[in-house]
Image (cartoon, rainbow, N blue to C red):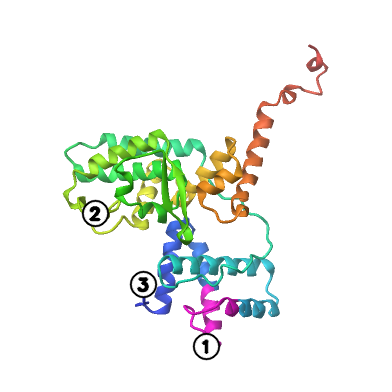
């Protein structure tokens, strides 16, 4: 069922962009740049009597033809297309439109950007801190106990599976009555895929289910992670806020920890440890292998670093003749 817009156009743009910001972990500067692009496009639509919710692929091709005639740089066009693709993908995800009109519009050629990821050490610090927070809370305080266990469980699931936060919040409780190594989830575009849980994640989920059952308000909720009032699922905003507070307690002041960054970390760390691209593509739910290939640049840098650290030739000082003696 298609939703109707109740806010002004400007407020609606802000609402959708904030959802994107929370899901992708984007900075406010990036969001402001996105808004500038989207407002410019919507103005063009108004001048050409096009409703932005009904804009077609042809409308967007005409729009970019207009930009090209105005001699916009390729980098500017790429950013505008990226802004619009993310905006309209979220419109579809939030059921304001049925189809994304930008799905078939190819990206402008641009330099490949390396996805940012947390180090394995930082991931371990986050998980350890979340676990210790849970253990330090008295058993009588079930509300605080549940909140601390929730972020610990969410972290374990995100890092174990690499799933998107939108996929995580929609997980039904019924899928976890019996926890298996593999779980089928519904991803982008309504496409189903399997994700894998490691043993540690499964144990934490079992603990979450035990404590979740102690909260009466959650008894009739169908989601794995209910909202605090027991109506519906936990929000992206709540997860992002919990992650922010957790990272702040570890003095990760310069690191913007978000569910999307945990997903990037999952992919990067698997590649660093020898996973192949096709398997990773399936785990991440990427429709196109080129999306997954962005991570190979991260892996190349990692491998170069390993060679510098461990290759035996690096132990030889070629300015010192003694180094050549056996």
The residue positioned 58% from the left and 75% from the top of the image is 57
The residue positioned 60% from the left and 41% from the top of the image is 276
Residue 56 highlighted magenta (yes or no): yes
Q: Secondary structure at mark 2?
A: loop
Q: Is residue 150 above or below residue 72?
A: above
Camera-side residue of 61 and 175: 175
What x and y, as percent, mark residue 164? 45, 52
Identify the magenta region.
38-60
> Which image quarter holds the N terminus?
bottom left
Q: Is residue 36 left or right of residue 258?
A: right
Q: CA distance from mark 1 to mark 3?
A: 25 Å
The disc, 1 or 3, on the residue closer to the chain's N-terminal end is 3
Which corner quadrant of the image does residue 322 belong to? top right
Q: State the residue position of label 1.
A: 49
Q: Is residue 248 left or right of residue 82?
A: left
Q: CA distance from mark 3 to mark 2?
A: 22 Å
Q: State the residue position of label 2.
A: 221
Q: Is residue 199 above or below residue 99?
A: above
User: Mark number for residue 145?
Assistant: none
The disc, 1 or 2, on the residue closer to the chain's N-terminal end is 1
Q: State the residue position of label 3.
A: 1
The disc, 3 or 2, on the residue closer to the chain's N-terminal end is 3
Q: Residues within 10 Å of mark 1 (few under 14, many from 20)?
A: few
Question: Do we see residue 178 in this rendering?
Answer: yes
């Amino acid at each position: 069922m298609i939703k109707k817009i109740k806010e002004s156009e400007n407020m609606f743009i802000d609402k959708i962009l904030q959802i994107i910001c929370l899901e992708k972990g984007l900075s406010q500067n990036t969001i402001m740049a996105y808004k500038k692009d989207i407002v410019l496009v919507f103005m063009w639509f108004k001048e050409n009597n096009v409703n932005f919710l009904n804009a077609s692929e042809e409308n967007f091709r005409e729009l970019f033809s207009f930009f090209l005639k105005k001699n916009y740089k390729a980098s500017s066009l790429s950013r505008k297309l990226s802004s619009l693709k993310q905006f309209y993908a979220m419109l579809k995800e939030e059921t304001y439109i049925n189809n994304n009109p930008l799905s078939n519009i190819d990206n402008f050629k641009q330099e490949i950007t390396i996805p940012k990821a947390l180090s394995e050490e930082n991931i371990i610090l986050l998980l350890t801190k979340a676990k210790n927070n849970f253990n330090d809370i008295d058993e009588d305080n079930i509300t605080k106990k549940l909140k601390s266990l929730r972020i610990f469980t969410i972290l374990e699931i995100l890092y174990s599976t690499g799933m998107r936060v939108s996929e995580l919040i929609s997980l039904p409780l019924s899928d976890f009555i019996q926890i298996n190594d593999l779980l089928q989830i519904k991803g982008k575009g309504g496409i189903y895929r399997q994700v894998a849980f490691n043993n540690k994640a499964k144990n934490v989920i079992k603990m979450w289910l035990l404590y979740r059952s102690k909260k009466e308000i959650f008894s009739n909720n169908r989601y794995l992670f209910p909202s605090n009032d027991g109506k519906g699922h936990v929000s992206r905003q709540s997860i992002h806020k919990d992650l922010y507070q957790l990272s702040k307690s570890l003095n990760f002041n310069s690191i913007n920890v978000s569910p999307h960054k945990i997903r990037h970390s999952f992919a990067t760390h698997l590649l660093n440890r020898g996973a192949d691209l096709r398997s990773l593509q399936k785990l991440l739910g990427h429709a196109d292998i080129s999306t997954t290939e962005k991570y190979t640049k991260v892996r190349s840098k990692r491998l170069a670093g390993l060679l510098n650290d461990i290759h035996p030739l690096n132990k030889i000082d070629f300015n010192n003749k003694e180094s050549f003696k056996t």
